[in-house]
Image: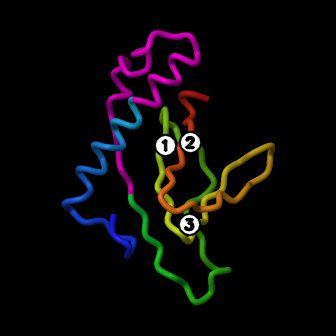
Amino acid sequence: LCGCGLASREIVPEYSKCVAELGETIAKILAEALGLPLNYFINMEWLKTQSIGMHYYPACPQPELTQGATKHTDPYFLTILLQDHIGGLQVLHGGNWVEVTPIHGALIVNIGDFLQ
């Protein structure tokens, strides 16, 4: 993905393929850790569905007035997120919303409601 925060049409299919492969690898590791057959999660038909969302929020001169996504849970098995340098992602931990500090080049992997 390019430095401007916008994705090129040529990059998105390759990125999507790589993230899908990573998701399969993580699913196998989780299955093994839970004592399940390696392909336990992968063989579930509905888990073969992948969606990709890209959000771009332009800078606001009054950031205290902005609001991104509302509080929610991810209904999926996994969410793999590439966060930009600005951040803004929060996770619910111990009943409190905690900022997730962006780390350049790092992916964030959230377990979804299905796995929870």
Asked if disc 2 and disc 1 are in contact, CB closer than 8 Å, the reply is: yes
Find the distance from the CA under tag 2 to the CA under tag 1: 5 Å
- 3 or 2: mark nearer the eye: 2
Horizontally, residue 39 falls left or right of residue 95, namely left
Seen at 51% across and 18% down, the residue is 31
Seen at 38% across and 22% down, the residue is 42
Mark 1 vs mark 3: which is more N-terminal? 3
Q: What amino acid is labelled 3 in the image?
A: Gly
Name the one closer to the observer, 22 or 9: 22
Where does the magenta region start and end?
25-53
Q: Which residue is mark 3?
A: 68
Seen at 39% across and 71% down, the residue is 5
Q: Which mark is residue 79?
A: 1
Horizontally, residue 115 falls left or right of residue 17, namely right
- SS for callout 3: loop
Q: Where residue 95 sits in the image (x, y, percent)?
A: 80, 45
Q: Is residue 105 magenta?
A: no
Above or below, 26 relative to 10: above
Q: Where residue 86 sits in the image (x, y, percent)?
A: 56, 71
Q: Where residue 21 sits in the image (x, y, percent)?
A: 34, 36
Task: Count residues near mark 3 (Cα–Cα under 10 Å), then give few for <14, some for 14-19, many for 20+.
Answer: few
- SS for callout 1: strand
